[in-house]
Image (cartoon, coloured by chain):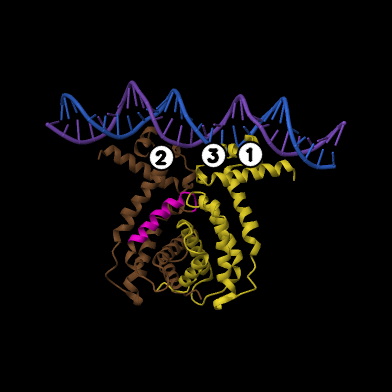
Chain colours: A yellow, B brown, C blue, D purple
Amino acid sequence: MDRRQQKTRIAIYDALTELLKKKKFEDLTVQDIIDEANIGRSTFYSHFETKDQLLEEMCREMFEHVFSRDLAPESGHDFSGDHKGIAARLTHVLYHIREHKENISAILGGESEQTFVRFFREYLENAFDDVLGYVSSKVPKEFRKQFIIGSFVETVKWWIGTGLKLTPEQVVADYLLMLNGGGK
Amino acid sequence: MDRRQQKTRIAIYDALTELLKKKKFEDLTVQDIIDEANIGRSTFYSHFETKDQLLEEMCREMFEHVFSRDLAPESGHDFSGDHKGIAARLTHVLYHIREHKENISAILGGESEQTFVRFFREYLENAFDDVLGYVSSKVPKEFRKQFIIGSFVETVKWWIGTGLKLTPEQVVADYLLMLNGGGK
DNA sequence: CATGTTATCGAACACCATGTTCGATATTTT
DNA sequence: AAAATATCGAACATGGTGTTCGATAACATG
């Protein structure tokens, strides 16, 4: 890949990251990004068809290169009788999110959140395929899956909304408690 | 209120309902609505500042006049040892949603979904205030609340996404099972 | 019914972001 | 050194938005 292309791409990503500290994604114009990245207008459009595609690619990058590094279940410490180390794995996910809270927070809460959430769900479905495949005696598999993932996504959104006050460990602990009927 | 205003408003609402059968909300232009409603351009803008405000008002109307009619807990049949008739009340909500599936389905799944979901959450928080206020011994109140509502909203979104295949009763039953740890 | 009020109409307009085009220039690859 | 390719940026076409305003029609009130 041409060095010029790499530089441009990075400039755009950096510009976006920078701008997301000040504005929500949907309030940004392509011109904003172009100015911040200090590139030509047509250059931007030779890399991305549209602003939304940029977001798409950025999310893809994030999940492919950041989260999916540790898709496999942890082989180590299975504390608290945790089935297949779910708690540890979920905690891991939350740590990654906290690392990227700058970007993610700005994406969430607006219209652009759906794109992120789409990737997030897909990631979770793959990453926790083993757990989700488990068939309950009472609740249909699809429903169970929907419920577990949906409630986790919502929990994460809520967590970010609070400004990440709780620790990842606390969030996961409460989440698993609720999932096991601990809300009674 | 002037009859003309009423007619215009209804024409706009009807037009929107009609158009939502064919297109997603965010793909509609103001002109589409104007044409379908058969009104003048400036007339639309004398009623609504923007397309989004129209959606806002429509959602408000829906929740104020349709859902909130039966906010109070059902005094009757408390079958299956159901605490305060939650199952019955949730089922009621789903029936309302099914009534308005035409509108709701078109709003959900797009960027406009957030507006609807915002109203939905607010409604649920009020409608089930009594249940949600219950303090768990282990999980913090706010977390519990977030979890219960979030997972229900997600369940409803999922349900609509499947084309309302399950009956409201089935959905509620499975939801409550999951909430009580029935997913194990 | 008469009169003042208010809503509607719709064409015209200014505005702004989008996405494209193209020839000149700069950088990289081979 | 030559060929290939990326960038630049001004200019442009497009399309939806929201506003303006004078003319017309519908309404409320006494």
The kind of residue on which mark 1 rests is Phe
Residue for badge 1: A44
Tell me what residue is drawn at x 33 percent, y 64 percent: B129
Question: What range is drawn magenta here?
Answer: B109-126
Residue A29 numbered tag = 3
User: In the visual, does A88 lie left or right of A181?
Assistant: right
- Judging from the image, mark 2 belongs to the subunit labelled B
| Residue A79, percent from left and from top | 57, 76
Q: CA distance from mark 1 to mark 3?
A: 12 Å
The kind of residue on which mark 3 rests is Thr
Q: Are marks 1 and 2 on the same chain?
A: no
Q: Can you say whether B2 is above or below A79 in the image? A: above
Q: Are marks 1 and 2 in contact (CB under 8 Å)?
A: no
Question: Foreground: B176 or A123?
Answer: A123
> Predominant secondary structure in magenta?
helix
Residue for badge 2: B50
| Quadrant of the frame with the N terminus of chain B | top left
| Residue A158, percent from left and from top | 46, 59
The kind of residue on which mark 2 rests is Thr
Magenta stretch: includes residue A130: no
Q: CA distance from mark 1 to mark 2?
A: 30 Å
Residue B69 numbered tag = none
User: In the visual, does A184 lie left or right of A170?
Assistant: left
At mark 2, the secondary structure is: loop
User: In the visual, does A172 lie left or right of B169?
Assistant: right
Q: Are marks 2 and 3 on the same chain?
A: no
Question: Foreground: D27 or B133?
Answer: B133
Q: Earlier in the sequence, mark 1 or mark 3?
A: 3
